Image (spheres, rainbow, N blue to C red):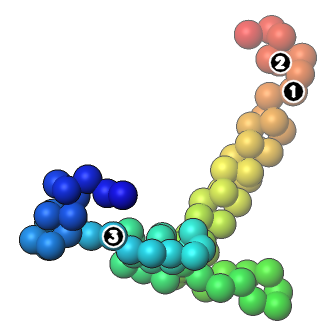
Amino acid sequence: MMKKEILESVDNNKFHIYPVEKISQGIEILTGKKAGEINKEGQYPKDSVYGKVKKRLEEYVERAYALKKKYSRNEIEDI
């Protein structure tokens, strides 16, 4: 099914094909870091990819709430 060029590249270690069943497996292959498993408290390990993503998303939410608080609807209309 694959083009001859791709198969040759695989044979020459210039290209790799990794079978994965879950996105987390692909993340680990691409980053070289653990994706992270969620625990009973709904948290990921802080040093995992998912843990870092969760932290960044929480920071964005905090900034959004801070901006909403800083600029009331009336102040935005005056700008």
Q: Which quadrant holds the N terminus?
A: bottom left
Q: Quadrant of residue 16?
A: bottom left
Q: Residues within 10 Å of mark 2 (few under 14, many from 20)?
A: few
Element at label 2: helix
Q: Depth-wise, is mark 3 or mark 1 nearer the camera?
A: 3
In the picture, the quarter occupied by the C terminus is top right
* Amino acid, disc 1: Ser
Q: Secondary structure at mark 1?
A: loop
- Residue linked to disc 3: 17
Mark earlier in primary sequence (3, 2): 3
Mark 1 packing: few (<14 Cα in 10 Å), some, or many (20+)? few
Which residue is under mark 1? Answer: 72
| Whole-number angstrom distance, CA of label 2 to CA of label 1 | 5 Å
Q: Is residue 74 left or right of residue 46?
A: right
Would you say the residues marked 3 and 2 are in contact, meaning their CB atoms lie under 8 Å apart?
A: no
Picture coordinates of residue 27, whole percent (x, y):
48, 70
Residue receiving disc 2: 75
